Image: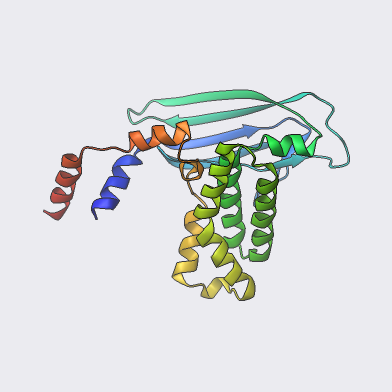
Amino acid sequence: MMRQLRLIAQNYTIATAVDVTVILHPDLVFDEAGYQATNRLVKEVGNAAKETDLTFRYKAKDVKKKISKQSIPFQVQISYTLKSGMRCLRVLSKSHEVTQDRKQMEDGINVAVVGVATVQSTAVMACQGKTKEAQAHIRSVQKMMKRGAKEGMQLEEQLAFRKESESLRMELRKAAVEDDISRRSDQRTKIFTSNKTTSSNMYHGSSAPLKMKKMKSRQVDNDLVVQQYLNYQS
């Protein structure tokens, strides 16, 4: 009970009624289950907590056509309501360089971001009953990480990915042999469902500045937690 109260205190709600709109370049389309293959995607998030992470997959609109541009713009529009009741809109825009060199892309891989995106998309496939497709997806990403992770931080994040995704990969192996969505065990359902909303802070190396910052932010007043527990008991 104490641990659960501490986790709730750490992962507090930041905003409510959150809607996220992601806009891609016209040469790209989203590759998300349940969404049309367009360059604009709107996702209703609802409540956003401190550790809420969203990931999106996209691909070339025409796989036979090479993108000739040196960089491609992306835009994210986030509308949300603060605790005070104020309705806000935040717009984030950024351009990323384009490369046709697979090795260059893999060498510069952000293992933590790719890791959480892979686990989330794999869990979505598994919840839909596409266990073999999900297993193939996570295996292909593991191979890509093995080829691209060379630096110390990348290797740390690769190890974190393997550790955090172990239960999901194990359950996928079992489900690939025998799986019935209507008769799934509570344990299997829990693993697949919880990994759909996994947080990126689990996939950063132990020495990563972001993870160190998050670890410091998790230090809470023990007296406050004890008081919360006592109040709950009463």
- Residue 214 vs residue 5: left or right? right
The residue located at (60%, 38%) in the rendering is 42
Asked if residue 55 can be seen in this view, the reply is no
Which residue sits furthest left? 234
- Residue 223 vs residue 114: left or right? left
The residue located at (25%, 38%) in the rendering is 220
The residue located at (65%, 63%) in the rendering is 130
Residue 219 position within the rendered picture, expressed as x and y whole percent measured from the top left: 29, 37
Coloring applied to the structure: rainbow
Residue 12 position within the rendered picture, expressed as x and y whole percent measured from the top left: 34, 39
Viewport quadrant of the N terminus: bottom left
Residue 139 position within the rendered picture, expressed as x and y whole percent measured from the top left: 67, 57
Which residue sits furthest right? 64
Count of numbered circles in the view = 0
The residue located at (62%, 42%) in the rendering is 56
Residue 25 position within the rendered picture, expressed as x and y whole percent measured from the top left: 73, 30
- Residue 216 vs residue 173: left or right? left
Residue 185 vs residue 81, the one in the foreground? 185
Asked if residue 100 can be seen in this view, the reply is yes
